[in-house]
Image (cartoon, rainbow, N blue to C red):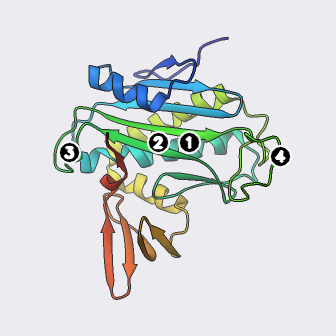
Amino acid sequence: MIAPSFPPLMSGQALAGQADPFEQACQQATLGCDAGLILHHVTADRLRAAIVFAPELALRQALAMLPACGLGLQNALGALAPPEVSLHLEWSGGLRLNGGHCGSLRCAADTCDADAVPNWLVVGFDLALLPTERETGHHPEETTLFAEGCGEIGAQALLESWARHTLHWITRWEAEGNAPLHAAWRGLLYRVGEDTRWQDQKGHFLGVDENFGMLLRQGPDTRLVPLTTLLETD
């Protein structure tokens, strides 16, 4: 099998067995691997990948890589899928394909201090390709690429396209700041302008602030939930 082709400044490493690309990326980042490393794992039913970043800005700003990777995946699927297929992004990282949950984005860093410059940052995704159960319909809120008419999309082609589109958004972010990334991401956020729940908090999802934090209106008050809340810790 031919290895995936990634853009300059990115490199790939395929994982075998039960290895989790996100966990492996965090481990390799801790050991000091090069930025731009993409670890990936493909099975018949799932595509998982994670990329390592070496930020030069405070964590609050560096976490723009989470929406950049989300937009990269949305753009990649948009380029390969039939026109009637739409992918929306939950603020908390969930992926919604034609409204159904089909996977998630994750992020981790070596610090949770929003004002500190992290040594590394990892963003990964997990995408369902095929149903895992022989009989469908047990989980009506969940879907897969195959169930939504995307069965002809190859996992490797999608992975390569994700890397290219993600690099595009990173390059644009570096040149133009948050504004273009913010506008595109907000336009794809799931349930903006609707009542929602975040952990144990209920409120009206007003949108996101300049650093991509959730603005949640609760009665007369508006609560800001920073993007750092989504960081996974040991």
Amino acid residing under circle 2: Cys
Residue on which disc 3 sits: 58
Q: Is residue 171 above or below residue 230?
A: above
In the displayed orientation, state which residue is furthest to the bottom. 220
Amino acid residing under circle 4: Glu
Residue located 51% across and 22% down the image: 6
Mark 3 near mark 4, Cβ–Cβ under 8 Å? no
Mark 2 near mark 1, Cβ–Cβ under 8 Å? yes
Q: Give the secondary structure at mark 4.
A: loop
Amino acid residing under circle 1: Leu
Q: What is the crowding at mark 1: few (fewer than 14 residues within 10 Å), some, or many (at least 20)?
A: many
Residue on which disc 4 sits: 135
Q: Is residue 47 left or right of residue 57?
A: right
Name the front one of labels 2 and 4: 4
Q: Give the secondary structure at mark 3.
A: loop
Amino acid residing under circle 3: Ala
Q: Quadrant of residue 41?
A: top right
Q: Considering the image in quadrants, where does the N terminus appear?
A: top right
Residue located 53% across and 53% down the image: 94
Residue located 40% across and 27% down the image: 25
Residue on which disc 2 sits: 69
Q: Give the secondary structure at mark 2.
A: helix
Q: Considering the image in quadrants, where does the C terminus appear?
A: top left
Q: CA distance from mark 2 to mark 4?
A: 32 Å
Tell me which numbered mark, 3 or 4, is placed earlier along the sequence. Answer: 3
Tell me which numbered mark, 1 or 3, is placed earlier along the sequence. Answer: 3
Tell me which numbered mark, 1 or 4, is placed earlier along the sequence. Answer: 1
Q: CA distance from mark 1 to mark 4?
A: 28 Å
Name the front one of labels 3 and 4: 4
Q: What is the crowding at mark 4: few (fewer than 14 residues within 10 Å), some, or many (at least 20)?
A: few
Residue on which disc 1 sits: 73
Q: Could you tell me how many numbered marks the image carries?
A: 4
